[in-house]
Image (cartoon, helix red, strand yellow):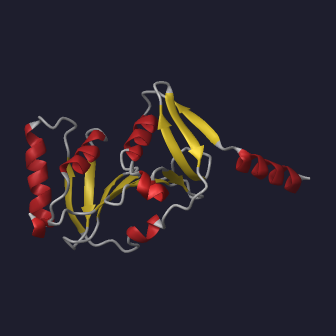
Amino acid sequence: MNKTKTEEKKKTEEKISAFMVKKSKSIEYQKLQWILRAASIDDCRYSITGVHVDSEKNMVATDGCRMHVWRDCPIEQIGFFQVIETRIGIIFLRKEDDFPNWKKLIKKKLPEVLVNFDLPHNIKDRSFGSSIFKLFSKTNACFNISYLLDLASYKHAQWTVYGNDPDAGWLFRCRDMEAVIMPMNTREI
């Protein structure tokens, strides 16, 4: 009897093609907005124009140059979703497409920690420039400033940076949030 109820529940969950998260000032809503900053807006890259939630409750978004991950997110639905932000909340519409294998970008064995740094929420804060300089001097990699501003938008959090190759993606970690950011190609500058 329990097996039948479980199967019915699973079928019902599979049928749900849309849901909404209401706008709020909660930390979960702020994390959701942070994840959405990394979703691609390029319609030519359809397979990365939304967010993916996997069975391990990881929510992931990428635009091909950076990826944001929220570990243990409270979203119950699993799948790939197109996201529409409205004035009352965020609507998730199920997409019939496959999201890229994002886990291969995060190495199982991380290189040693290169730098811990705080990014002030306000770019006009004097310590913002010194934080960016510290990051550049420790990594010898140049990152898109708008991606670093997205890290800063996650309030006054301390980020730990992992990596050892100036031409490969760098992992930025802050508690249950992660970002993999590709450095800019400085050879062309």
Residue 179: x %, y % from top left: 34, 56
Q: Is residue 189 left or right of residue 9?
A: left
**Viewer-side residue, 49 vs 67:** 49
Residue 70: x %, y % from top left: 44, 51
Q: What number of labels is visible?
A: 0
Q: Is residue 12 left or right of residue 33?
A: right
Q: Look at 55% across and 44% down and name the residue there.
A: 74
Q: Residue furthest front?
A: 44
**Viewer-side residue, 83 vs 117:** 83
Residue 184: x %, y % from top left: 19, 62
Q: Look at 8% across and 54% down and name the residue there.
A: 133
Can you say which quadrant of the picture contains the C terminus? bottom left
**Viewer-side residue, 60 vs 44:** 44
Q: Look at 19% across and 70% down and name the residue there.
A: 166
Q: Residue furthest right?
A: 1
Q: Look at 76% across and 52% down and name the residue there.
A: 10
Residue 143 visible (yes or no): yes
Question: Is 87 above or below relative to 47?
Answer: above
Q: Residue furthest top?
A: 88
Residue 70 visible (yes or no): no
Residue 116: x %, y % from top left: 21, 56
Question: Is 175 above or below relative to 28?
Answer: below
